[in-house]
């Protein structure tokens, strides 16, 4: 009965001889266009002018120097997390806990700052910044290493473990800002003190919040591109993800691949967290991320798991975030609309990706 | 001792949504499909159930709305994972992210609203000392869940359809060679799974915390996924596991209540940490996994590819 | 025209896949009680034709007549209802279910389990296919699993039984037993379609044969009246070239390059085979073979030799004089090991990578990799040279591994390993699924390696191949290795006996290593 449901579709999928390179690059573009189209329909359904809605998402974020700086600023955590996730996913290690690694990185960076940012601090601004960044990277890497350990020693599924750890990380942050790291002069609000400006990241674009973290991010993307595409290490990670038996035959250690990818991924997520604390947020709050770690998963896929692609994907996802915020103030729509768009984009991307391996054949042609 | 009966009752209450979701996921996974969208399905079903239940004042309609939403989302998943043979992990994640966004979006209007209290308990039985308040004072959906568990056990092991389902999960290639419609069977399994996750989500917003807040499900979808693995895909063990996890969820409140001085946020970590510990324990022995886990779990199946 | 006496008549069947015409204008007729062979080498289109008859695949054109009537076999259920049953080459079994459950799934209606169990026992006894219905399939040997497939087919009371390469998993003795069963079935009026490329078997069993090559029918005959040479001419257009294996009389005094020294290895996982006391040596300039039906420890032995399994004690495997049992693959390569694994796609090569990228699986040092960076120009250059030298049909070094045919990919992998100039060359199933031309070339290259002084170990399930290539032969059975015997003294019968593990009760030359020719 259900077989006929499938065969009665008006099209058929035919396996290609070799995957289409053109579609590999075209697929995200098609997916984005379709998402915008569905978005316009959504606006209509909600009683808003679709053109105005699309303008909020596509035009307004570029409308001023400040808007562009915000676009670039928001892309930093997305790109950084996606760089790390690209490594993991290529190795077929499904690290879904980037959000938790981000949170712990932010927590460690913030804790370091709480510790050194005291009235007669002995540590200078520059050194403090470096220490904070190291704390963030180590924190994120450590959080990811728990997942690695459990998969290495107990064969526990990394998807579920890293996800559970995300919830734990968020609770840990809540506990910290309600307890040990709470600002004593903060009127009992659950937050740490605001950090002194000398420990904040230097600005990149004057008059805006954009900091040098963006430059670091671009450099990181280039380094990762070289690592993954040209280095032997990167090659061996990728083989492990695509053909585990061949990797064993070649002598690539799967345990090695597991630890390297998770530590890199956690480190990047932790770095992103540190940048948020020493950048736009400036203190520790009960929540430090509007879901960057999850959005970065989508970014990695949009970017075809390639570091340079992650940069473009990060900018696009940043656009969606900004659009959501603007939609709230300018269209009166809940900012949660960003999540709807994100989900739609990923669905459409997955669907379009089918066309890389398969050709579409309309049945009335035969 | 008079603390024990309310504890048991609270554990059953907390375990019911896990039981419902895990039963649906069990059927999915027995057919070889890994649907990581459980969390998203439960979220959307929760808000849909609440919205319908609030506006129609009928919890029953709310539950039906929840189940329907679950099935709709499962259909979306099937379209991608079965027809287009996309990566099941990524597709499930997409479903969860989408569900989180959609539920938050729709739920904005319903934050803070309250539902009227519903009747609980089986009249007559709930009067029995100790056993009554402990076991027979639940919302009717909890007993439906129990019946569902028994029905699934019978289905899997005593019917031909159940045998076919298990075969499809073990080796879709062999099932296909024998002429069974692997994708058709998996689609039905996904629909059923969606309906169950839908009921679970609706239970959370209609019965457990009868109101809507963003992120109401708080990871229970993921816990249910772990639960199915922990229970080695057997219905009786899922029942036991959901009770245990329900108990762990309740434990934090109990400990706070008796004055344990651990901060509340740390106590709230208990269910998640317990899940991790359980996952580590059961995954340790690969032979045991091979014998119990549906061998094709998570791998896309393309008929005619070979 | 439909032959009225035929049970099955196929006319002008055609089936195309992207890039290949699998079946081109196929005609075939089978009478009741006839054992009809479909003969052809790998890739001739036999399996596709059988899938069409059984309903798993739909033909692009052509008709099928069953007992004189035109039928459309849209799916296996319809085929079963007509009375067609098939035993696949790759079994359609469910490991974690019992024999009875597996058989129930192959039947169309809900049957009472107790009744089914009784019928399984009855059928088993009647045809010599004994089975224990309540055992789980994963505990069965390969031969027993085939019995489950056959009993499942027989319980549908077929009028036509299709067997696809049934003897590749059987010892010579088990093959004889199978033939007795099949003759009995044919005598009862059941038609049998027997797919194979094994000429001796077809001549022994079948009443008639249709020969296929490159998707078409190239001949019909009565194999009982033909010689193997005649059949092979129909099958590949030429006679099978007899390889000239020159035995080097000095080889037994040469350096011992590979010594498997009482290797013991417990099971790595549930479905594995334990290795017990494996003793084997290969000297420079000789080819040693290990025969055996699949599932008797070959995979485990190969993993221990390649370094994918590092649990052996160091001196259980000696490679050019060094103890390597505990080492990973690359240290072993450094000591002169070249290894071609059984699975081409997925182990020997990464399907989605180019041939030049696949070089890096076993070439990982300078000049392929410098300072941690890959020199893609160099890998491409060497890949191109291998393609040329081994006449690999591929669009170039950038062709994806999965775009090559089985034979061509195997040639590339063999070439890649030989590029290492190994002192020890180990190859498993060198010509499985490979067309005859490529197989001959691969055999020639292996012989050439031996002439250059390499020590070669061949693990194979094809006795013909081993008899053609090897100087000495072992047999592996249930994780244990027989002593070796010089190939001139080996017979198929003896090897068949040894495949059941019975080498200790054998003739006096068992255990004696011939020191001279």
Image (tube, rainbow, N blue to C red):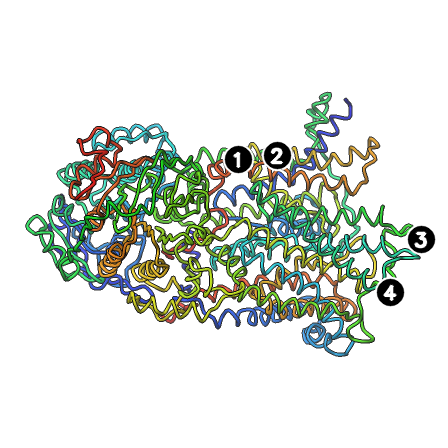
Task: Mark 4 vs mark 1: give the one in front.
Answer: 4
**Residue C458 visible in the displayed image:** no
Assess disc 2: are there few (<14), some (14-19) or many (≥20) residues with their C-alpha within 10 Å of its C-alpha.
many
Query: Which mark is drawn over residue A185?
Result: 3
- Between the residue at mark 1 and the residue at mark 3, the CA separation in whole angstroms equals 55 Å
Percent coordinates x, y for residue C141 in the rendering:
32, 36
* Residue B17 percent location from the top left of the image: 65, 40
In front: label 2 or label 4: 4
Side of C177 where B96 appears, left or right: right
Residue B170 position within the rendered picture, expressed as x and y whole percent measured from the top left:
43, 43
Q: Are marks 4 and 3 on the same chain?
A: yes
**Residue under disc 4 on the same chain as residue under disc 1:** no
Q: CA distance from mark 1 to mark 2?
A: 10 Å
**Residue B234, which numbered label?**
1
Residue C41 location (% of width, % of height):
22, 56
> SS for tag 2?
helix
Q: Quadrant of residue C450?
A: bottom left
- Which label lies toward us, 4 or 3? 4
Q: Chain of mark 3?
A: A
> Label 3 near label 4: C-beta < 8 Å?
no
For the question of whether residue C287 can be seen, the reply is yes
Please state, as top left, top right, bottom left or bottom right, where the C terminus of chain C lies in the image. Answer: top left
The reply to whether callout 1 and callout 3 are in contact (CB within 8 Å) is: no
Q: Which residue is mark 4?
A: A197
For image coordinates 77% across by 71% down, the residue present is A210
Q: SS for tag 1?
A: loop
Residue beneath disc 2: B241
2 and 4 marks on the same chain: no
Q: Residue at x 43, y 52 (%)?
A: A249
- The one nearer the camera, B18 or B154, is B18
**For residue B14, which quarter of the picture?**
top right
Q: Chain of mark 2?
A: B
């Amino acid at each position: 009965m259900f077989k006929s449901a499938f065969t009665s579709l008006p099209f058929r999928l035919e396996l290609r001889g070799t995957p289409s390179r053109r579609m590999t690059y075209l697929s995200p573009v098609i997916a984005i266009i379709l998402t915008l189209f569905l978005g316009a329909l959504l606006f209509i359904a909600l009683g808003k002018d679709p053109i105005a809605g699309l303008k909020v998402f596509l035009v307004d974020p570029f409308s001023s120097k400040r808007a562009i700086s915000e676009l670039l600023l928001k892309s930093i955590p997305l790109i950084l997390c996606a760089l790390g996730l690209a490594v993991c996913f290529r190795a077929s290690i499904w690290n879904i806990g980037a959000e938790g690694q981000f949170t712990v990185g932010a927590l460690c960076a913030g804790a370091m700052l709480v510790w050194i940012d005291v009235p007669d601090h002995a540590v200078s601004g520059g050194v403090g910044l470096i220490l904070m960044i190291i704390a963030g990277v180590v924190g994120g890497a450590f959080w990811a290493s728990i997942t690695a350990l459990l998969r290495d020693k107990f064969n526990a599924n990394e998807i579920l473990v890293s996800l559970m750890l995300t919830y734990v990380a968020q609770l840990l942050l809540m506990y910290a800002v309600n307890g040990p790291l709470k600002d004593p002069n903060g009127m009992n609000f659950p937050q740490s003190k605001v950090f002194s400006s000398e420990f904040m990241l230097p600005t990149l674009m004057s008059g805006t919040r954009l900091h040098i973290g963006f430059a670091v991010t671009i450099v990181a993307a280039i380094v990762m591109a070289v690592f993954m595409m040209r280095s032997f290490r990167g090659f061996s990670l990728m083989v492990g993800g695509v053909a585990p038996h061949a990797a064993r035959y070649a002598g690539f250690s799967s345990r090695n691949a597991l630890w390297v990818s998770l530590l890199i991924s956690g480190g990047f997520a932790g770095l992103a967290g540190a940048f948020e604390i020493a950048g736009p947020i400036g203190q520790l709050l009960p929540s430090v991320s509007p879901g960057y770690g999850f959005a970065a998963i989508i970014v990695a896929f949009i970017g075809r798991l390639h570091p340079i692609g992650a940069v473009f994907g990060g900018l696009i996802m940043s656009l969606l975030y900004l659009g959501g915020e603007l939609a709230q103030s300018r269209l009166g729509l809940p900012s949660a609309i960003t999540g709807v768009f994100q989900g739609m984009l990923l669905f459409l991307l997955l669907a379009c990706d089918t066309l890389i391996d398969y050709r579409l054949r309309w049945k009335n042609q035969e | 001792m008079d603390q024990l009966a309310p504890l048991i009752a609270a554990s059953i209450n907390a375990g019911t949504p896990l039981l419902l979701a895990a039963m649906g996921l069990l059927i999915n996974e027995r057919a070889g499909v890994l649907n990581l969208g459980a969390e998203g399905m439960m979220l959307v079903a929760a808000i849909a159930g609440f919205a319908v239940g609030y506006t129609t004042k009928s919890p029953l309609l709310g539950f039906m709305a929840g189940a329907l939403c679950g099935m709709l989302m499962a259909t979306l998943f099937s379209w991608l994972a079965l027809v287009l043979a996309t990566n099941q992990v990524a597709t499930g994640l997409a479903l969860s992210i989408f569900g989180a966004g959609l539920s938050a979006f729709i739920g904005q209007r319903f934050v803070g609203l309250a539902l009227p209290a519903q009747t609980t308990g089986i009249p007559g039985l709930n009067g029995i000392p100790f056993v009554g308040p402990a076991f027979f004072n639940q919302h009717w959906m909890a007993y439906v869940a129990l019946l569902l568990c028994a029905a699934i056990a019978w289905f899997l092991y005593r019917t031909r359809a159940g045998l076919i389902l298990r075969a499809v999960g073990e080796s879709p290639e062999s099932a296909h060679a024998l002429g069974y419609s692997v994708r058709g069977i998996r689609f039905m399994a996904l629909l059923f799974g969606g309906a169950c996750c839908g009921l679970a989500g609706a239970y959370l917003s209609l019965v457990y915390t009868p109101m809507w807040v963003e992120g109401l499900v708080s990871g229970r979808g993921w816990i249910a996924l772990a639960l199915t693995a922990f229970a080695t895909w057997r219905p009786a063990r899922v029942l036991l596991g959901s009770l245990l996890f329900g108990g762990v969820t309740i434990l934090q409140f109990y400990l706070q209540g008796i004055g344990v001085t651990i901060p509340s946020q740390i106590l709230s970590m208990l269910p998640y940490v317990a899940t991790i510990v359980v996952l580590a324990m059961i995954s340790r022995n690969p032979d045991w996994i091979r014998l119990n886990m549906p061998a094709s779990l998570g791998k896309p199946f393309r008929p005619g590819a070979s | 025209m439909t032959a009225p006496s035929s049970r099955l008549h196929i006319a002008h069947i055609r089936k195309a896949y992207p890039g290949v015409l699998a079946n081109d204008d196929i005609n075939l007729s089978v009478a009741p009680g006839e054992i009809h062979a479909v003969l052809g080498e790998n890739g001739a289109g036999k399996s596709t034709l059988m899938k069409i008859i059984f309903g798993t695949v739909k033909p692009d054109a052509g008709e099928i007549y069953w007992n004189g009537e035109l039928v459309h076999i849209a799916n296996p259920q319809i085929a079963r209802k007509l009375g067609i049953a098939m035993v696949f080459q790759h079994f359609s079994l469910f490991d974690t279910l019992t024999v009875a459950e597996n058989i129930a799934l192959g039947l169309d209606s809900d049957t009472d389990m107790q009744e089914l169990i009784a019928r399984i026992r009855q059928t088993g006894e009647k045809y010599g296919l004994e089975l224990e219905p309540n055992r789980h399939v994963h505990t069965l040997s390969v031969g027993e699993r085939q019995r489950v497939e056959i009993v499942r087919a027989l319980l549908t009371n077929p009028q036509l039984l299709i067997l696809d390469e049934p003897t590749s998993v059987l010892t010579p003795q088990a093959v004889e037993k199978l033939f007795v069963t099949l003759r009995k079935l044919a005598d009862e009026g059941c038609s049998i379609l027997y797919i194979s490329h094994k000429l001796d078997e077809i001549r022994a069993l079948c009443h008639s044969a249709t020969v296929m090559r490159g998707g078409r029918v190239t001949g019909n005959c009565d194999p009982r009246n033909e010689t193997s040479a005649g059949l092979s001419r129909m099958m590949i257009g030429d006679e099978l070239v007899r390889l000239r294996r020159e035995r080097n009389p000095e080889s037994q005094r040469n350096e011992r390059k590979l010594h498997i020294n009482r290797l013991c290895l417990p099971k790595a996982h549930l479905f594995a085979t334990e290795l017990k006391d494996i003793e084997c040596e290969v000297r420079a300039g000789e080819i040693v073979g290990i025969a055996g039906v699949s599932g008797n420890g070959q995979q485990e032995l190969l993993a221990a030799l390649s370094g994918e399994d590092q649990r052996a004690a160091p001196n259980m495997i000696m490679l050019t004089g060094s103890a390597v049992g505990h080492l990973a693959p690359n240290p072993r390569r450094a000591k002169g090991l070249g290894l071609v694994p059984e699975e081409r796609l997925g182990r020997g090569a990464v399907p989605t990578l180019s041939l030049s990228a696949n070089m890096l699986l076993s070439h990982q040092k300078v000049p392929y990799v410098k300072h941690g960076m890959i020199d893609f120009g160099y890998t491409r250059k060497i890949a191109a040279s291998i393609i040329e030298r081994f006449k690999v049909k591929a669009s170039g070094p950038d062709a994806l591994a999965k775009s090559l045919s089985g034979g061509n990919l195997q040639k590339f992998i063999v070439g890649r390993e030989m590029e290492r100039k190994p002192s020890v060359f180990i190859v498993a199933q060198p010509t499985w699924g490979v067309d005859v031309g490529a197989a001959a070339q691969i055999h020639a290259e292996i012989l050439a390696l031996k002439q250059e002084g390499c020590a070669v170990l061949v693990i194979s399930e094809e006795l013909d191949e081993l008899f053609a290539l090897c100087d000495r032969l072992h047999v592996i059975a249930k994780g244990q290795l027989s002593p070796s015997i010089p190939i001139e003294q080996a017979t198929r019968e003896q090897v068949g006996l040894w495949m059941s593990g019975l080498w200790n009760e054998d003739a006096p030359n068992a255990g004696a290593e011939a020191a001279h020719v």
